[in-house]
């Protein structure tokens, strides 16, 4: 539970314009969709996907690190990583399995992105809570994802090249599904409690030395 007194204290350290920006962004955030990055090894690709998640209002990113560490380049991400929840799976060789189990426990269907399917993006049912898995730059999604996914989708292409860069594919996918989702009657927005928790974290990400300020608040409170 968030201490309302502490929240009010920290909130007083940011401008009204910043508060309004937070409220506006939170009103458009969703956990109806999420993105899974499986063994992405080029930092600029992972960073660009993180940036797209922020831009299109997707709050959570799941990073599976079986072979490679998922690194975010601050230059490419433009600070967007500060506003998202990035969940890392890097404990053992079964990280993909562990990630999928967690996602399913949260009600997500697993959708593998691949050019080798007949299911096109335009036909995807956006009303279903979905986790979109984007695989390694060269090999694509793993065999495990191919076996365990609840469905697949592709972005139709008419040129000679059969695949898109992962960051481009993620941006196209998220733009399409989030745009269509907001036109439905689905309750895709965050709960009031989720908004409050993120608001609190974003304030701490904005101000300098938040831990020291929190310590000062409780010390002053207990005088």
Image: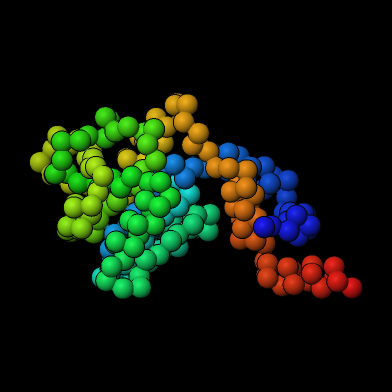
Q: Nearer the viewer, residue 121 or 126?
A: 126
Count of marks placed on residues: 0
Residue 72 image position (x, y, % from top left): 40, 63
Nearer-the-camera pick, 46 or 64: 64
Residue at x-position 20% and y-position 46%: 114
Specify how the rendered protein is coloured.
rainbow
Residue in the image at 18% along x and 52% along y: 147
Q: Is residue 13 visible?
A: no
Residue at the right extreme? 223
Residue 175, compared with residue 206, is above or below; it is above
In the image, residue 82 lies at what x, y percent? 53, 58
* 126, 40: nearer the viewer: 126
The answer to whether 130 appears left or right of 190 in the picture is: left
Counting from the top left corner in percent of width and height, residue 57 is at 48, 43
Q: Residue at x 61, y 61 (%)?
A: 205
Question: Quadrant location of the N terminus?
Answer: bottom right
Residue at the image position 27 percent from the left and 30 percent from the top: 122
Q: Residue furthest front?
A: 105
Question: In the rendered image, which quarter is residue 128 located in?
Answer: top left
**Apparent side of residue 105 relative to residue 15 in the rendered image (left or right):** left
Q: Residue furthest left?
A: 160
Q: From the viewer's perspective, is residue 154 above or below residue 42?
A: above
Residue 83 in the image, given as x and y percentages of width and height? 53, 54
Q: Quadrant of the C terminus?
A: bottom right
Q: Is residue 218 left or right of residue 41?
A: right
- Residue 215 in sight here: yes
């Amino acid at each position: 539970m968030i201490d309302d007194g502490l929240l009010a204290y920290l909130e007083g350290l940011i401008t009204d314009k910043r508060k309004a920006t937070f409220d506006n962004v939170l009103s458009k955030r969703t956990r109806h969709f999420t993105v899974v990055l499986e063994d992405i090894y080029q930092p600029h690709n992972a960073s660009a996907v993180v940036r797209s998640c922020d831009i299109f209002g997707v709050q959570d990113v799941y990073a599976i690190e079986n072979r490679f560490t998922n690194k975010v380049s601050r230059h490419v991400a433009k600070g967007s990583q500060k506003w998202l929840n990035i969940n890392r799976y890097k404990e053992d060789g079964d990280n993909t399995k562990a990630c999928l189990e967690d996602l399913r426990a949260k009600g997500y269907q697993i959708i593998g992105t691949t050019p080798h399917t007949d299911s096109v993006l335009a036909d995807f049912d956006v009303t279903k809570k979905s986790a979109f898995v984007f695989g390694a730059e060269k090999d694509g999604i793993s065999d495990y994802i191919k076996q365990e996914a609840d469905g697949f989708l592709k972005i139709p292409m008419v040129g000679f090249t059969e695949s898109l860069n992962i960051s481009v594919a993620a941006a196209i996918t998220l733009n399409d599904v989030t745009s269509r989702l907001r036109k439905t009657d689905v309750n895709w927005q965050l709960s009031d409690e989720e908004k409050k928790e993120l608001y609190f974290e974003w304030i701490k990400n904005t101000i300098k030395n938040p831990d020291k300020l929190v310590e000062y608040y409780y010390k002053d409170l207990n005088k």
